[in-house]
Amino acid sequence: MPLVKQSLSTALAARGYTSLTAVQEAVTEPGLEGADLLVSAQTGSGKTVSFGLAIAPTILGNADVFTVPAAPLALVIAPTRELAMQVRHELSWLYKEAGAVLASCVGGMDARSERRSLERGAHIVVATPGRLCDHLRRGAIDLSELRAVVLDEADEMLDLGFREDLETILDAAPESRQTLLFSATVSPEIARLAKRYQRDAHRISTQSSGNQHTDIDYRAVMVAEHDQENAITNLLRFYEPPNSIVFANTRASVARLVTRLSNRGFAVVSLSGELTQSERSHALQAMRDGRARVCVATDVAARGIDLPNLDLVIHAELPQSEEALLHRSGRTGRAGRKGISALIVPPRARNRAERMLRGAKVTAEWVPGPSAEAVLERDEARLLADQVWEDPAADAEAATLAAILSQRSPEQIALAMMRLWRGQRSAPEELDPIAPRVAPGSNFGPSRWFALPIGRADNASPKWVMPKVCEAGGITRSEIGAIRIFDDETFVEVSENVVGHFLDALGPTMEIADGLSLVMLNGVPDAVRGGGKGGFDPRRKGGPKRSFSGKPHRGSGEKPAWKEGRSTDKPRKYDDDKPRKYSDDKPRKYSDDKPRKFADDKPGKPAWKKSGDAAAKPGKPKAKYAGKTTKPHRGKRG
């Protein structure tokens, strides 16, 4: 292994390492000893071991083992408690042969015990930003001897608002230190932080440009709105992984899912912000030793979790960003193991899920939720492949085996075995089918037609009809085929796959608005079959362009004759038999026979004003306008 201390090589071999990962090889290249590094790599690619190897030449020097511990030589900062404890665990076995003493400064732990550990001395300190700053202010930690500083998950620390704490820590460390920044993505903020606190940093990226993590299979699971939690149950039953994480966006969602899964017989724990450090540690330990197999968590609480057999990640709710999607999914597919990342996508979230997957540069397979039949088929396959069939009978089991064979037939024994197997597992849920997405211009497939008693004469338009039908029936635009609008009625095509759910959502009245109900038809309407004008098909561009504002009028009165026959005898406004405004027989304002205001013969007008002789006006002219032809504009200095 290139440029790795002998003590570390021994620890790696004992751990089962036969080769280094891409990021581990990159940071141990010749010429990078003691250099500042800005590293971006895929989650689960062995970053902890990589920065442990990268700082070894700096903190060990020419020696292979450490001397007596005193002030810390290396500092590793992580955003969360779980990640910090995981980093300490990894560095403990990596530096075991080198005789390293490690200490931690983590929020939620006993600060007095941490201060005593720092007083006894440590070679490497693993900390979270807030608790480390607290020790700095109290003078409990001395950073003057630091040779290396590592910021793990730097992007997450900035997102969580730790910028000021990080700047305080880095300003307190010696300028001659080696600084390593590990981040999943190099955002502009990360670049500014690197420029300020690193010296001629080497940029290392082991992420494949435009390619997703090859050890993670992404599945976008399309389910009906009311089947989201049922789909989670079926996914857990279908795959039955040793460990799995279900991600939710809020603490309330975590609590609801934990209750639901616990009631269905799953061994489940939760991770969310309100738990104490002791409760979080117990939850993770239960996952590691097999007492629990499902963890329901929020994004921040699950940051940095590394479970050895985590094969399935379920996004019960879509994450808030592409980065969150990658971080969530990165809990699986680690260290060469394959994993599955499944997004629960109700119809209303389809477009957002597609945008998020494109932004994260990952390709997902769009599949329906596992049906109850599919789960039972997997149960049968697992039962037949179980190792229990191959294990020979022990001496203590021989007598019972003979008694069973003497009293029961092979069919009875097999049936009992199958029932016992299924009885240990939660029964799968029945999921309503979801229509596949139809590409524009493609064949819509089997469908049912519905009629509305409004048309163009009532200002009906696709812009109003489509959202009303989708909202009332709990379906999406992709489940609507064509919308045909005629003079007095409108026809809507709905995919056959969602008709059952559509009718349940509408209810017995089948109303999509007050007083406006759909009517289900048998077959294709004659007007549609005849190809009448005015039909609107959302699968093709164009269609009639009609302005619409508000709800269409649905009056029940008979149409006037002119409207019924489209005759020319429609009464027009301002017809010739109706007097028009300002007609010749109506006196106009200021006509010649009406005295005008300020006429010359108006009484009381001064003589000088009548004659127009301004010189005859009594009084003196104003001096300030003397010699001027015009009066200056008001507000300006003359």
Image (cartoon, helix red, strand yellow):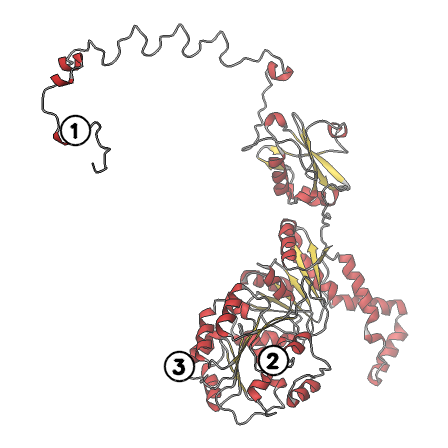
The answer to which of marks 2 and 1 sits earlier in the sequence is 2
Q: Is residue 347 left or right of residue 114?
A: right
Residue at which label 2 appears = 32
As drawn, the label of residue 608 is: none
**Which amino acid type corresponds to the residue marked 1 in the rendered image?**
Gly
User: For residue 171, what is the image quadrant?
Assistant: bottom left
Residue for badge 1: 627
Q: Type of residue at label 3?
A: Arg
Rounded to the nearest angstrom, the CA distance separating label 2 from label 1 is 90 Å
Q: Quadrant of residue 428?
A: bottom right
Q: Position of residue 144 (x, y in %)?
A: 45, 85
Q: Which residue is mark 3?
A: 138
Q: Secondary structure at mark 2?
A: loop
Q: Eyeballing the image, is 385 above or below 222?
A: below
Depth check: give the residue in front, 447 or 413.
447
Q: Earlier in the sequence, mark 1 or mark 3?
A: 3
Query: Which residue of the protein is positioned furthest toward the left in this rendering?
Result: 619
Name the quarter where the N terminus is drawn.
Answer: bottom right
Tag 2: residue type? Answer: Leu
Q: Residues within 10 Å of mark 2 (few under 14, many from 20)?
A: some
Residue beneath the point at 64% across and 88% down: 5
Is residue 90 visible in the rendered structure shown here?
Answer: no
Q: Callout 3: helix, strand or loop? A: helix
Where, quadrant-wise, is the C terminus in this rendering?
A: top left
Q: What residue occupies the far front of the structure in this picture?
A: 627
In this rendering, which labeled residue sits more in front, label 1 or label 3?
Answer: 1
Which of 469/304 is in front?
304
The residue at the far bottom in this view is 68
